[in-house]
Image (cartoon, rainbow, N blue to C red):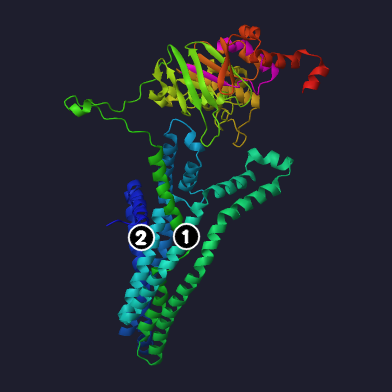
Amino acid sequence: MRVPAGYRTRWASLRLLWGSSRGLALGAMVMLVADAALPSLTLVSMGRAAGHIPGAVADGVSSAAGHALWWALALAAGCFTLSMLRGPVEDVLSAAARARLTAVLQERLVRAVSAPPGIAHLEDPAVLDRLSFAQGEVMGQQPADAPMTLLQTAGGRLGGLVACGVLSGYHWWLGLTLLAAWLVVRRPLGALVRSRVGTFRAAGEPLRRSWYFLGVAWRPQFAKEVRVFGLGEWVLDSYQRWYTEAMRPSWRTVGRLNLRVAGAGLLVLAAYGLGAGTLSWDAYHHTVGLRTLATMLPMLLATMPVGSVTATDFALESMLSALPDLDGLEAALAPPALPAPADPADPEALAPAAVAPADAAGLPRAAIRLEGVGFRYPGGQQDVLHGLDLELPAGTSLAVVGVNGAGKTTLVTLLARLREPTAGRITVDGHDLADLDPAAWQRQLAVVFQDFTRYPLTAAENVSLALRHDPPDPGALSRAAERAGAAELVEGLANGWQTVLSPHYTGGTDLSGGQWQRLALARALYAVERGARVLVLDEPTAQLDVRAEAAFYDRFLQITEGTTSIVISHRFSTVRKADRIAVLDAGRITELGGHDELLATGGQYAELFRTQAARFTGPASTRRGRQ
């Protein structure tokens, strides 16, 4: 028999709790039993105590009836105390389970999104939607809370069922009638919950957009432009517009279900009216004692959790709906399994099979080649690169120049296996790059990206980044800083290498754009010190001042010494010292040679070089006219 998806998700959440902490899981099961039994036990014991009151009043508290009342009150107080303690104990258990499961789920999530060697999946809207749901970002509910919330809800349901059973001991049909009424109305109420959550999930992209605009309102990186350009109202309007668009289907669904929910409410109200009326009739005709009346009257309300829907049900459905997203991300983003070692005694094992990735350590020794490489972004209308052929001998430097949009940075991402070519191939010493272990190959690269990351960590951590999980090497740090022109910068920091580079932390400081760029260059050179053989510099002087750029130009040969280097820059003073210069235009290499050679050719490189040089060598009026 096939188990419905909803039940599979519930069992999965319970297995998750059991796998993360059996102690917490057992504690939660004890609380489940307490939630099911204590409310009804408390009401029964209080009703029993109420039944002894007339006898104790008539005979005195020292009589047998009085003693029975004292014992009944003591039992009722004990049950009531235990019932009141459920809340704090469940809060402690829930907090502990949330902390444990949050760590487990976040680790799984980080491993899942980090598994692919590239970044294409992080630009896929479907993956981003699933990622937002798995984090609980869109729904506003954390999946780590699902197991404990599920058990608490189940405890309430069982408690309502026990209450129905107690009522059946009074009149067999009364408890069954209330149970049947709740089972009938549970279907439309459950549909309301699932529909509400389903419409939230269908609106993943507009909800992500609305949360983005909400973040624009308070995140520091947006604050300056929001205020200078007066964007506050626009940000608020955009948030409201996208949120309204996301919620509109949900509101329409709720409107359609309101009539069914109202009908269900009338049915339940009639069932409780029948129960209260029966008790009132029996009390009026003295066919029910005080003990039974004091027990059964509050027991009517105790049956409500057996089928009622509260905000907790919506929250639980939201939490549970995120768990399959995490499973889906892990399955979709997992690397292909490596083939098992072949058994020479098995003839079938000698058949061609998938080959394990080749080790990339120490490459390249001969050359990197791009053979007919093409690339088109998903959903794009035209190729960014097409038919691109290029050879980069090991130990040489290559500069790549071209107008904006020519595909220079895309070329870097293909070389680093952050994206895969859509045509052609890249080889390293004759090995297809796709056949190399991607993680091992990426360890051979040291890249300064144009949009490099500024980590709110110490200067030492920003440069070393626990490379290869080793502690920072002081000697390598010093050499990398010296080659990057960042040694004086580090020495001027309040705590040297241990200075936190963020003003958001006590004792921390921020750097200028040029200072950050030097530190990013030091990060790449530290990786070279630790074994990387390919150095890629994407616009390495974009944020440097004139003197710093000149110093970089003077140190270019020192910086790239001993590596296979690629430098991308619009500044020709930076690229002219490279061994060769490639002009990338319309997705192809159109010119290739040394600086003097390309100038003599009089092609696009010469035109771009002379245009840029004229801005600095021509008369001031001419320069202003060109600006």
* Residue 278 sits inside the magenta stretch: no
Q: Residue at x 45, y 59 (%)?
A: 194
Count of residue discs = 2
On-image quarter of the N terminus: bottom left
Furthest residue to the bottom? 285
Q: Secondary structure at mark 1?
A: helix
* Image vertical order of residue 394 relative to residue 109, above or below: above
Q: Tell me the CA gap for discs 1 and 2.
A: 30 Å
Q: Secondary structure at mark 2?
A: helix
Residue 410 in picture, x, y percent from top left: 54, 26
| Residue wearing tag 2 | 31
Q: Nearer the viewer, mark 1 or mark 2?
A: 1
* Image vertical order of residue 69 relative to residue 327, above or below: below
| Along the viewing direction, whichever of 61 and 515 lies nearer the viewer | 515
Visible in this render: residue 525?
no
* Residue 548 sits inside the magenta stretch: yes
Start and end of the magenta stretch?
532-558
In the rendered structure, the answer to whether residue 610 lies left or right of residue 85 reads right
**CB under 8 Å between discs 1 and 2:** no
